[in-house]
Structure formats: C-alpha cells, structure tokens
C-alpha cells in the first residue's frame, strides 16, 4: 500500500478470469466520453436510476453517451422498493425499448440501484453487460466489488439474486459532493472497517487523514476508496461464494443488526449501526485480551473523529441477545461473531466465552 | 455410438468442470431410494410440479425422499404460466418453508416446470441446488442438457432467466407411459432432429427402431434418450453460451415458429411444428443440392413413420416470410437458417439464395 495521496484517477483491476473488470476512481468520470468509449462497446444502453439521482446526473450522462441509443428507467428511491416488482419494471423497460443481448445496463445510484440493476442484467436474456456508476460512498467501497446482486423478499433481505460481475465500475468522486452528510459518514464507517479487519497501515493512514476525509478532500477520498476496494477484492478473491473468510467483511454487523432492528429500520442508517457495532466488536475483542486497551481507544477515537456514533441506544442486553438470534431457545447456540485478533486482523469466531459477550452487551445496551 | 439396445439404467456424465453432473436414464428412477441417497445430500427439499403431474407422482416421490423435510408447490399446468409471477410464487414457497442455502429444489414435470424451477434455484439466496426429474420425452431429451432456465415476458419468450446447471437429472422412462400420444410424438420430433443434425448412424438406428419407439419400448427409449442427450451435450460443450454451433439444435425451428404463430400458439404442438419445419429444412437443403433426393425421401419417411406431420398448414409463403422476420422492411435481410450439408451434419447458413427459400416456402405454404 502506498501511503501517499492519489492526485489523479486510479484504476484497480479485479481479477476474475473471463469475468475480470476494472474499477476507476476519480473526479468527473461520469462525463468522461473517452472512458465510456474505451470501455462500453454496446450501442444501446438502459440507465437505471432513481428519483433522487436522476435530476442530478442523468441528463449529462445521457449526453455523454451519445450517439448511443439511451433509454432510462427512473425508480422510486429507497430500500423498500428493492423488490421483485421493481425488478420486473426494469425488465419491462428493457423489453419495451427492444434492447437485445448486446445492450448494456448502467446502474446510476447507490447500493439499492446497483443491486437491482445488476440482478436485471444477470437475468435479462440470461445475462447482458452492466456498468456500475455508484454515487454514494457506501456503494463505491462496498458494491463495487463482490458481484452480489439481489432484491428483497417481503420476509427476508436479499433473498432473490445472483452473483454477477459488472464489466466496469466508475466511482466518480465528484458525485459524493451532493451526498447528504449523514449518508457520507455512514459510508466512512465501511471504509474504516477495512482498516480494522485487514490493514493496520490503512488504519494509520485514516488516522492521519480523517480531517481531509471529513472535508471530502478529493485526493484523500480517492485513496480511501481505492484501498477499500483493494481490500474487499483481496478478501473476496479468496472466498468468492462466501463460505468462510468473506464473513470478516461483516465486522460490527451482528451488533449493528440488533440496533437497526430494535430502533426500527431507517432510524439508524446501516453505516451508523455498523459503526456502533464495530465499537462493540472492539470492546469484546479487548475483553478477550486479543487487542489491548490502547487499541480499543485508538479504534473508538477514530470512529468518533469521523462523527459516527460510538455508543448504541439502550436497547437492553437481553433483547439484543434475542435479536442476535441467541435467545434461550437456541440451546448452547453461539452466533458467529467477527472479532479482532489484533488491529488489522479479523477472525470469524464462535467459541468465545459467553460471559465476555454478555459483559459487552450489558456495558453498551443496559 | 453403440447400436445395441440398452437393457438397464444408463448414466451420462455431463462434463462442465465444477458444474459437472450425471444424467440417469431408466425405469423407476423416481422411486429409487438409493439413487436419491447417493446424489442428494440436502435434508430439505422443495418439489416444484404442476396440477397434471402431481397426482401421478408426487406422493410416491415424497415418500421416497423421507426422512428429508419435503415441501411442495403445485403450479397450474401450461406455458402461459411460465411467468415472473409464478416464479415469485416458487420463491414465496421457499421462504415460507424456511428453506436455507443447503436446501434443494426438485423439478418434477415437463420443460415449463424445469425452466421455472431451475430459474428459482439459480436465484434463491443467489443459487441453491436443483434436480431435474423430467416427465415428458421432450424435456428428457432437451431440458436435461444445456443449463437454460427462464420465464417468459408477456411480450417475448424466455426473456428472463439464467444459465444454471442441475446437480442431477433423473430421466425416468416409466413416467413416459402416462404421456398423451401427441405429446409423446412431439418429443420424438426432437429425438430425430439429433440424428439429422449430428449423427447419421443414430438416424440409421432410428429407422430400424421406429416401431419399437412408437410402442414406447423401454430399451429403445433408453437408447434414444441417451443418444439425444449425448449429442446435445457435445454440441453445447463446444458452445455453452450459444454464440454459434449451438444454433444447429434449432433445426426446423424457424419454419416451425412461422407455423406456430400463424396457427395460434397451442394449435400445433411445438414438436409437431418442428417436425414439419424439419421437412422444409430438408427440402431447402435438397434444392441447394447439399443433400440428394434420396436423403430427402429418407428423412421425410422417417418423420412420417413417427406419425408426425410432414406437411405444414397452408399459411401462405408471403405471410411465412414476414413471420420469419424477412418481410420487405428487412432490406436484403437473410434470416439465419439451419440446413443440412448432408444427413447427420447441419450448418448455420445465411448466404443461401433467396429463390431457393422462396421455392420451398411456396411449395409448402401456398
């Protein structure tokens, strides 16, 4: 890892044999005609976006893509629309615009748009090309790598989907300037996660550059996004289908899930709940003496400096246990947790002592 | 190819690396406990079937699968139900029965059931195992190989789907005994197709065994299904994603499509239209002197002996041209046709002389 700041567009190559693709990270990529002309051979495209993002970027993108035949479908904004019905609407739009097997889908928006547009691309005529243009920090550091696409079922998230890789990802840092502050910070929670689980030098860098990141400094952002994508790519390349190591990407998510569920979805942003959940994972790791008290303080301090919550709401430790799927009905059941062996090295653990977990839960939730 | 008749269950290995699977062909496989125990490790299964097939085989299959946890979803019978809505119904059933990533889907029925159940397996939790138990001759010789799954869109067939391979195919020849005569013969049309496009020795064998096949003789059926699957596997292995050679599997389908559309879908079974279409493809191949008049007579005679139509309805040659997508709007447009260079060798051709095609169309359709 270079600890210098990038000053121009960066390129990461995601190596997946025939399904390899590049991620570009930099300003104004969306409107770079040469970028599109180099990487998009399709003469017909469907832009999939939502009512929030469309007014900001769709006209310019449509113009940049000329003289290709460009159609678009503008979906309502929000996770509650990540359904088979909305998926079906994208398919209708592909059919009505008579797009053939050589057409491409462009996903212009956050993670929800990427998930749905990617799944539509995976299924339309059994698979057409798609390009991701993630416009949130979370989507840039998360959905850019891994090939997961899906829609929700009324009873469970991401129940219907496919592993399907994009042909190209354009992480345009200029689009982050329009991101609401809370959403931006929620994205930072996922960035700092990569440092904790995999790369202490990246943690060092984040500590030195947290003010620049808070100010959305372009070169700091480019480096942070690049390193996040690189780490996710390394983890995913070892475990593409999520059988083992890939679970470390869920640091803070089990605690975070309890928070989100207890507070009602949407009250806490996912990234906010993950931030507080990460603090709890650090706390438990410290109780097990895997990391020292100074490590814990460092971690909490960094999250705090990103203006992210380091204290969860008082939802009650017994309720939390139940929400984590560990109520008394699960006899002797230990939920797998992602804990830190040291800063920069996470592990999937299910043989932790229950009293330590209970101490963490009581400390934060009671 | 062996020209002897098989007298016991046959096994074909479909080689696709990690996605390889076996096809078993023989009587009473459905109820063979040892077959299931050898090949199905899942402890939870969902049987996807329809209202026609369920009363015939579902109870016995459910019993054979015990003590696995067996749920089922019984769909209405017919191509008109091969929709995203029905797909969604299968997904609902998977969720409601709390089937997890280790569960398996069993597709019990014809091609429509296989297409939908396979697509649901491809998408549920981004992919779970599935087993095909095709109960029609057409499905046994067609859907068993190739990994195509899909549902229809109101405006176009097979618009939404995936390439997804089963873990196991059980072509139980005993299930063919309950197949209506027309459907059985429609399946034979696809069997004879494999001889025409790829294997003149199989054509010889079919000529010698047509009476046995008409009588649904078990050992003749086992051989015919086996050789059909082998040929399809060879063609598909060369061209898994349908870029070139795989198109030869569509012998007779372009003419057949014109017949089906002109008569209204359902009036002619797909296999019946393909049979008449195959005669037309042979006729055109003979007009081009690629096959001789004796070859043409042999082919037509064989199809006739299978009690399949060798003469299409008089839909008019101009209308047929239009239905084939070759009306005057397509300037100089030649639709790709599958023609025979000789008996047992098909080719994808688009540089045939138009007058020869017109002669064939006029001869049969006017």
Image (spheres, coloured by chain):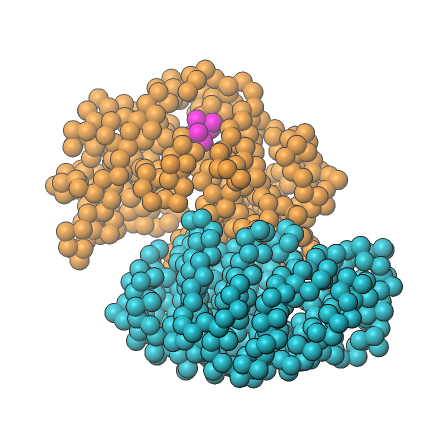
Chain colours: A orange, B cyan
The location of residue A305, given as percent across then percent down, is 35, 25
Dividing the picture into quadrants, the one containing residue A9 is top right
Any part of residue A31 in sight? no
For the point 16% across and 32% down, the residue is A288
Residue B179 rendering spot, x and y as whole percentages: 51, 81
Vertical arrangement, residue B348 with respect to residue B34, above or below: above
Q: For the view shown, which residue lies furthest in the left direction?
A: A355
Which residue range is magenta in the image?
A225-230
The residue positioned 26% from the left and 35% from the top of the image is A347
Residue extending farthest to the top is: A4
Residue in view at x 41 percent, y 82 percent: B55
* Quadrant assignment for the N terminus of chain A: top left
Q: Nearer the viewer, residue B197 or A209?
A: B197
The quarter holding residue A39 reads top right
Q: Nearer the viewer, residue A257 or A163?
A: A163
Quick check: is B259 in the magenta stretch? Answer: no
Q: Nearer the viewer, residue A114 or B348?
A: B348
Give the quarter of the figure containing the C terminus of chain A: top left
**Residue B144 or B79: which is nearer the viewer?**
B144
Does B261 sit left or right of A353 as displayed?
right
Relative image position of residue A262 (x, y in whole percent): 29, 49
Q: Is residue B192 left or right of residue B98?
A: right
Q: Main secondary structure of the magenta part?
A: helix
Asked if residue A199 shows in the view, the reply is yes
Give the residue at x 43% y 74%.
B7
Q: Is residue B45 above or below residue A192?
A: below
Residue A205's x, y, as percent? 38, 19
**Count of picture labels:** 0
């Amino acid at each position: 890892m270079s600890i210098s700041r990038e000053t121009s567009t960066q390129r990461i190559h995601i190596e997946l044999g025939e399904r390899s693709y590049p991620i570009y990270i930099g300003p104004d990529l969306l409107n770079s005609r040469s970028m599109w002309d180099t990487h998009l051979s399709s003469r017909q495209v469907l832009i999939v976006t939502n009512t929030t993002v469309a007014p900001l970027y769709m006209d310019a993108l449509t113009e940049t893509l000329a003289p290709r035949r460009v159609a678009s479908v503008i979906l309502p904004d929000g996770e509650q629309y990540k359904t088979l019905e909305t998926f079906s609407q994208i398919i209708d739009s592909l059919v009505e615009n008579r797009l053939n097997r050589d057409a491409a889908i462009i996903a212009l928006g956050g993670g929800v748009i990427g998930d749905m547009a990617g799944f539509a691309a995976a299924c339309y005529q059994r698979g057409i090309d798609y390009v991701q243009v993630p416009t949130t920090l979370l989507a840039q550091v998360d959905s850019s790598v891994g090939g997961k696409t899906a829609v929700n079922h009324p009873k469970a998230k991401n129940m219907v989907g496919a592993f399907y890789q994009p042909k190209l990802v354009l992480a345009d840092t200029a689009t982050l300037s329009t991101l609401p502050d809370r959403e931006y910070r929620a994205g930072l929670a996922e960035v700092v996660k990569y440092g904790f689980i995999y790369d202490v030098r990246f943690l060092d860098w984040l500590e030195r550059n947290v003010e620049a990141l808070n100010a959305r400094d372009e070169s700091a952002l480019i480096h942070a996004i690049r390193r996040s994508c690189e780490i996710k790519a390394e983890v995913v390349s070892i475990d593409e289908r999520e059988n083992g190591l890939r679970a470390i990407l869920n640091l803070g998510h089990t605690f975070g899930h309890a928070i989100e569920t207890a507070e009602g979805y949407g009250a806490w942003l996912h990234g906010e709940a993950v931030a507080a959940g990460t603090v709890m994972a650090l706390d438990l790791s410290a109780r097990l003496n895997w990391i020292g008290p100074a490590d814990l303080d460092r971690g909490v301090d960094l999250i705090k400096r990103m203006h992210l919550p380091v204290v969860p709401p008082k939802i009650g430790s017994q309720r939390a246990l139940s929400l984590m799927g560990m109520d008394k009905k699960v006899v002797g059941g230990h939920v797998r947790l992602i804990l830190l062996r040291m800063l920069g090295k996470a592990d999937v653990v299910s043989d932790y002592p229950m009293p330590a977990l209970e101490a963490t839960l009581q400390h934060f939730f009671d």
